[in-house]
Image (cartoon, helix red, strand yellow):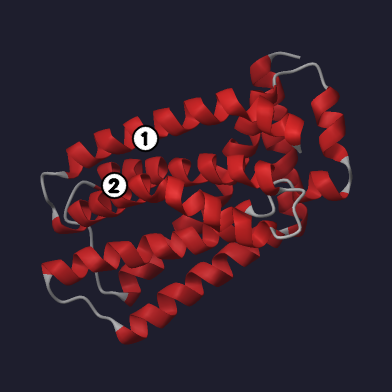
Amino acid sequence: MSYWMATRSIAVKDLRSEARTREMTNAMLFFALLVLVLFSFSFQPATDEERRLASGILWIAFLFAGVSMLDRSFWRERMNECLEALRLTPTSASALLLGKCLANALFLLLAEAILVPLFLVFFDLSFRGAVSAWLLVLALGTWALVVNGTFFAAMTTNLRSRELLLPLLLLPVSVPALIAVVEATAASLLGEGALRVWIQVLIAFDVIYTTLALLLFETVLEGT
């Protein structure tokens, strides 16, 4: 089996499994929607500075959604002892990680497609910049969160306190990318010219995170 066929097979397997149960999707939407609703009752942005703060609230909601989903990335494989079988397949370990990342990214983007319109309605906001640029920011920020989260989910999958350790490992590493994506979102909401610069920063972070995760995943998999 080729590298890309193995990656596709892993992603399709996770997508089909989630389509049957909808466990992760429901948990993501619940936590993220809860954050948006609570903040919308206590905070209504009126000035440009407050709109900048609102972009941070949006990504806090996405972060809650992502952590609740990523925690279960390897849960099915661990419970059914399928991870050992996947390790014995004649393909690269990085294909397993990449397939998992693609499936998780699609799950999170699906949740974001529901949450972003609600965010704009709850906070009475609109994008002043190009919508296509914002969609690129959304994809880049989501990938940075997913690739780090999937990597650390594999690292903590056999630990009893994985629910606690995953955010403790994920958040410090992801802080630079989260700062960039919040600034890019704020620039899109305010129509600022710095948006292009933040997109370039996000691309750089995505390349670095993805490269390191793919290179180190073989070692992580051997230790689980």
Q: The C terminus appears in which quarter of the rendering?
A: top right
Label 2 crowd (10 A; few <14 / some 14-19 / many >=20): many
For image coordinates 12% across by 67% down, the residue present is 48
At x 23%, y 41%, the residue is 198
Image quadrant of residue 3? top right
Taking the image as shown, residue 76 lies to the left or right of residue 136, namely right
What is the three-letter code of the residue carrying label 1?
Phe
Q: Is residue 217 above or below residue 181?
A: above
Q: Which mark is residue 117?
A: none
Image: 190 above or below 54: above
Q: Disc 1 vs disc 2: Cβ atoms closer than 8 Å?
A: yes
Circle 2 sits on which residue? Answer: 180
Q: Residue at x 51, y 63 (%)?
A: 64
Is disc 1 placed on a helix, strand or loop?
A: helix
Disc 1 or 2, which lies upstream in sequence?
A: 2
- Give the quarter of the image for residue 86: top right
Name the secondary structure under disc 2.
helix
**In the image: residue 74, left or right of residue 138:** right
Q: Residue furthest bottom?
A: 41
Residue 67: x and y in percent read 56, 57
Asked whether 129 or 98 is in front, the reply is: 98
Q: Give the residue displayed 21% in from the left and 63% down from the top.
A: 52
Residue located farthest toward the top when viewing the structure as drawn: 2
- State the separation of the CA atoms marked 1 and 2: 9 Å
Q: Is 93 in front, or is 9?
A: 93
Q: Looking at the rendering, in which quadrant would you find the N terminus?
A: top right
The residue that disc 1 covers is 205
Residue 141, percent from left and from top? 39, 45
